[in-house]
Amino acid sequence: MAKTTLMFGSIGAVVESSDIQRRAYNDAMREAGLTWEWDRDTYTDLLQQVGGKERIVHLAAATGVDLPQATIDRIHARKTDLACARMVTEGAKLRPGVADLVALAKDWGMKLAFVTTTYQPNIDAVFAVAGSALLASDFAFIGSRTTVENGKPAPDIYLAALAALGVTAPDALAVEDTAASVMSAKRAGIDVIATPGAITAQQDFWQADLVLASLAGDSHIDARVLAMLDRP
């Protein structure tokens, strides 16, 4: 039976922004007087931990640094400001196939959802860089950090999206870019395509129903994506 709902999860499933986020963390931590420098390998490992503040807490514990919550909040807020600004000034692009698949889904009358648990400024930045290729008004559901209490890999945000849209898990197909986020969708009973980004490619996506470098190749939506949607 054809899927009726297409769900994009983390902002990294829509825009390749991981390295922008990494560099913004480094600048924010430096401004706070910390000597940490997250290279690509370190940040790759940290992405196993969902949530920006949680990554700072994790590394502080691992290095024996006592960081007050207020400092963690300040670093994360500054990181968000820097990353969002850079997404716009550096011209972050939609990942291949995203705009085309959204356009097809709209033509087919599918419901669209942005099932993220990130902070609102990050969501705003995604739509800012996407321009007319991806509009917030296209989405019947947009989640954020405040939508549910438990973030990914808990299934809460996906369950909230299903309830808000009035659909069941078999109706939906999710697109995610990290293993923890794939787990979130699968725990909600939703089929998932994983499209790892440059920094998440080494994660173990064993729970995904399909793993692709991108949704499209040679300007055409991958036929396996259309098959999972049960669309020609």
Image (cartoon, rainbow, N blue to C red):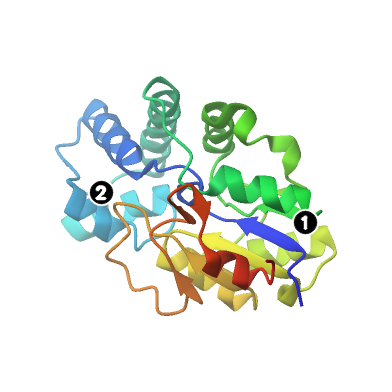
Note whether 52 is above or below 94 in the view shown: below
Q: Would you name the residue on which mark 2 appears?
A: 66
- The mark found on residue 110 in the picture is 1
Q: Residue furthest right?
A: 166
Q: Is residue 71 visible?
A: yes
Q: Is residue 64 visible?
A: no
- Choose between 208 and 57: the one closer to the eye: 208
Tell me the residue at 41%/26% (across/down): 91
**Kind of residue at disc 1:** Met
- Choose between 217 and 72: the one closer to the eye: 217
**Kind of residue at disc 2:** Asp
Q: Position of residue 27 (x, y in %)?
A: 26, 29
Q: Position of residue 221 (x, y in %)?
A: 54, 55
Is the N terminus in the top left, top right, bottom left or bottom right quadrant? Answer: bottom right
Secondary element at image label 2: loop
- The mark found on residue 96 in the picture is none
Tell me the residue at 25%/49% (across/down): 66
